[in-house]
Amino acid sequence: MSFSNRSDTISVPPLAGLGQLLPRLAARWQDRAALVTEDRTLSYDELNHLASQVAHGLTRRGVQEGDRVSLLSQNRWEWIAAYHGVLRCGAVVNPLNVMLTGEELVHILNDSGAKVLMASRERLEAVSAALQDASSLSRTICFDEGLATAESFVDMLGESDES
């Protein structure tokens, strides 16, 4: 498999899983921009580090290989870091449409057996009443600060720096 941009082509040996892709790219293009958003630019190395922090935080919360982790948010850097972190710990990413109603969301969470939901504050507030019926969920993690009904994504990231 080959990846290329305007200035480089890199051949990548077959991957055992998608969780290996970002570390390989980070080793090759450490300081190059991997993600540019309105409020933040992340290099491959920075994104790789964040993905490792997410993987560590999820593992500490009991997420194991094959578990489902759902992501519910508009596009943002935290979603991308969470996506790669879920893959890194061997779990299955379950991306969810932000237009789902609470009832639709709960059905998908229960049907997929999602163990963790990682979401924006806006989406969690919109579906909070319905989430009480999500029997498969053991944890809810909010990308934004200050939501009492969910764990903080930022706090989870900081845990790996403390250990």
Image: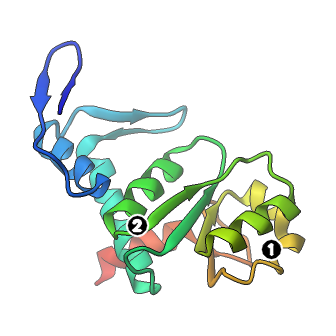
Which percent across, then down, holds residue 56?
34, 75
Which percent across, then down, holds residue 141?
60, 71
Q: Secondary structure at mark 2?
A: helix
Do the numbered discs 1 and 2 sit on residues whose CB atoms are within 8 Å?
A: no
Q: Secondary structure at mark 1?
A: helix
Disc 1 versus disc 2: distance between alpha carbons? Answer: 23 Å
Question: To which residue does mark 1 refer?
Answer: 131
Question: To which residue does mark 2 refer?
Answer: 54
In which quadrant is the C terminus drawn?
A: bottom left
Query: Which residue is at 56% across, 43% downward?
Result: 76
Disc with the residue nearer the chain's start (1 vs 2): 2
Relative to 112, say whether 93 is above or below: above
Nearest the eye: 56 or 36: 56
> Position of 82 compared to 133: left or right?
left
In which quadrant is the N terminus drawn?
A: top left
> Position of 59 compared to 3: left or right?
right
Three-letter amino acid code at the position of disc 2: Val
Relative to 115, say whether 31 is above or below: above
Query: Which residue is at 87% across, 71% downward?
Result: 130
Give the crowd class for mark 2: few <14, some 14-19, many >=20 residues within 10 Å.
Answer: many
Residue occupying the far top of the picture: 6
Query: Which residue is at 55% across, 32% downward?
Result: 38
Here the colouring is: rainbow
Which percent across, then down, holds residue 136?
67, 81
Which percent across, then down, holds residue 151?
61, 77
